[in-house]
Structures are given as C-alpha cells and as structure tokens.
C-alpha cells in the first residue's frame, strides 16, 4: 500500500476495524498476554518493535522498494525476537510447530 | 481435529507461537480472547469523547484534566495500559495540537483505543514533525498562518490526547450530545469538530 493510500479513508473512522485480520488481533493479544502474565514488560516489547519499524523505515529511505509488509508484520517479528531473546521460544521451535500444524490439516485431506 | 484450509504465512506463525506459549503455560486462549474483545469493543475513542465533552461543560474538570490527565480520566472510570502518563493538550483559536509517535505506534489506548492504520504509517510518522501543515491539508484541514501548530511526539513515556475546540452553536447541548460530536480524528489533531448544523447538511 502506498503511503498516500494509508492516509485515505480516515473519514470513515467508525467503519474502520481495529485489526485488519484475525492473526493481527492474535499477535497483539499474545504480546499483551505476556505482559499481563509478567513474562516481559511492554517497554521491552516496544524496544524490539521500534527496531523492526526503524529497519523498515531505513530501507525505505535508502530507496529499496517497500516490502509491503504492514505494521503487524513488524509487530510479529518483534514478538518472535523477544521470546527468542528471553529463551522462551526460538525460531527453530516455531518453524517446527508450523510444520506440525500444517501436517494436521494434511492428514484430514 | 483440524478442519478447513491450513493457515499460511503470518497466520500460521502466530498460531505456532501461540501453541508453544500455551504449552509452556505462559498464555491462555481465554485470556487472549478477552484481550482481543477488550480492544475491539470496549476501549475506543468513545471514552475520549466523554472526556472532551466533560471538559467542555465542567471548567473544574477541564483544569484537572490539563493538570493531570491520568487522574482526571480515572474520575470517569477510564484507565489502563498506555494511559499511565496521559497528557491532555488543548486546542485554542491560536494553537492547534497534533499527536504522533515517530518511532512506532504509541497512542493513548484508554481514551482512544488502538491507533488506526494511517497513524502507524511511515507517511504519517515522518511528515507529522517535518511538515505538519502539509499533512493536515491532506486530511482536509487548512490552518490559517496565524495558528501555531504544536506536534507532540509520544515516543517518551507520555501519551498525549488533544482536546479539540468546542464548535459554535453547541451552547445548549448536553454533555452526552456533545460527546457524540467528538471524533477520534479530532482527538489526534488531524481534524476539527464540525458544528452540528454543518454536519447535518453534509
């Protein structure tokens, strides 16, 4: 989405959904859930989010074509980095679980 | 157990992460559902609208709001994450306030809910500080040269909300009626509130 398009449609604020897709809502809830459970602070999460967004901003400023990744992609990347750095869940475990989930669907046919 | 089509991409990643965190006993699906429900339906700009309408009609409340917004909104039962250090900034005929988070997406959740997509966009974050008048023009808000534009960057601990100007022709309206006039965009500072007559004729 082009930046100009992001600014469009602001008048329809009451029709706007809070989350663009269910996975965005789930990612947000996971981050909040970890904070509420005392596993991390929101500031710790925000520091990673700022890193992710900053990297995308710099890539854009350097003229590389915008990846098209939205805010919640950065949000999810930040969340994955946080749980990996805290030694809770690493990238390999996530990859493995993704395969397992897909497999349960494949079995169904 | 699994029905339908397997999730892909980000949806699959989130599902995997949730399943791992749940397995470790760190999150519970019901608690996650409650969080989503809270931010989808309970926390939103209607809270902020109540605050603004009260500030317009109750001068003592307005003073308390400008002095310590966190404490003042708590009087109305409004509190929560990202509202711990709330600052209310007031628009006047000579000052227009605009809020932004240049680094990410900080926003006063208890009064405004979660931010809209455009608030988090590169375009908004980069231009709010560099060219606020040009940005506001894109939102359809042309400010006269004599109006000072103040931009509040929420990247520190503080979260800001704008108290928009009360439109003319609303002198006889009730607090509840006034709250219905107050828009999210006016509390971010990208819009003014239209007088009720002009709204009706649109």
Image (tube, coloured by chain):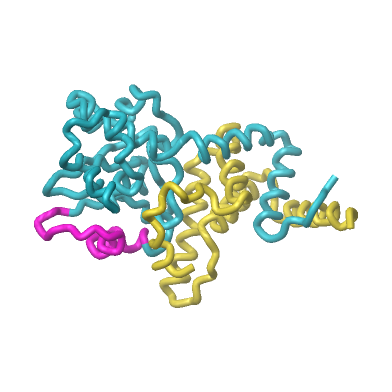
Left or right for B113, reference A45: left
Residue occupying image coordinates x 31% and y 63%: B127
The picture's colour for chain A is yellow
Residue B152 pos. (x, y %):
28, 49
* Residue reaching furthest to the left: B146
Residue A77 pos. (x, y %):
59, 56
Question: How many numbered circles does the render carry?
Answer: 0
Left or right for B107, reference A71: left
For the record, the magenta segment spans: B124-148
Image quadrant assignment for residue B67: top left
Residue B178 pos. (x, y %):
27, 34
Q: Is residue B131 magenta?
A: yes
Left or right for B79, reference B36: left
* Residue reaching furthest to the front: B201
Residue occupying image coordinates x 47% and y 71%: A59
Residue A60 pos. (x, y %):
45, 71
Q: Is residue B190 above or below residue B89?
A: below
Tell which of B103 and A108 is nearer to you: A108
Residue occupying image coordinates x 20% and y 39%: B166
Image quadrant assignment for residue B32: top right
Residue occupying image coordinates x 57% and y 58%: A73
Q: Is residue B174 above or below residue B168?
A: above
Res. A33 visible in picture? yes
Res. B152 visible in picture? no
Q: Is residue B90 magenta?
A: no
Q: Which chain's colour is cyan?
A: B
Tell which of B20 and B80 is nearer to you: B80
Left or right for A104, reference B24: right
Quadrant in the picture for the C terminus of chain A: bottom right
């Amino acid at each position: 989405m082009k930046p100009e398009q992001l600014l469009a449609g602001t008048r329809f604020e009451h029709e706007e959904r809070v989350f663009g897709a269910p996975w965005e809502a789930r990612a947000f809830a996971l981050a909040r859930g970890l904070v509420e459970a005392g596993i991390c602070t929101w500031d710790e999460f925000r520091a990673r989010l700022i890193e992710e967004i900053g990297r995308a901003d710099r890539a854009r400023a350097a003229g590389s074509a915008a990846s098209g990744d939205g805010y919640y992609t950065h949000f999810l990347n930040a969340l994955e980095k946080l749980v990996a750095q805290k030694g809770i869940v690493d990238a390999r475990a996530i990859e493995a679980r993704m395969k397992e989930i897909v497999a349960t669907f494949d079995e169904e046919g | 157990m699994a029905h339908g089509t397997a999730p892909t991409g980000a949806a699959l990643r989130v599902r995997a992460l949730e399943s791992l965190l749940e397995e470790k006993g760190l999150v519970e699906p019901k608690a996650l559902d409650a969080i989503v429900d809270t931010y989808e339906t309970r926390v939103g700009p209607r809270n902020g609208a109540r605050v603004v309408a009260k500030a317009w009609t109750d001068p003592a409340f307005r003073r308390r709001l400008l002095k310590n917004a966190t404490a003042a909104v708590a009087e109305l039962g409004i509190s929560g994450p990202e509202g711990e250090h709330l600052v209310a900034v007031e628009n006047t005929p000579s000052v227009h306030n605009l809020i932004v988070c240049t680094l990410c997406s900080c926003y006063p959740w208890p009064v405004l809910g979660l931010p809209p997509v455009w608030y988090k966009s590169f375009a908004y974050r980069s231009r709010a500080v560099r060219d606020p008048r040009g940005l506001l023009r894109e939102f359809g808000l042309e400010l006269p040269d004599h109006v000072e534009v103040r931009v509040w960057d929420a990247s520190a601990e503080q979260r800001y909300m704008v108290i928009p100007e009360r439109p003319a022709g609303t002198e006889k309206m009730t607090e509840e009626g006034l709250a219905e006039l107050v828009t999210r965009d006016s509390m971010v500072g990208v819009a003014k509130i239209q007088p009720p007559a002009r709204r009706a004729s649109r």
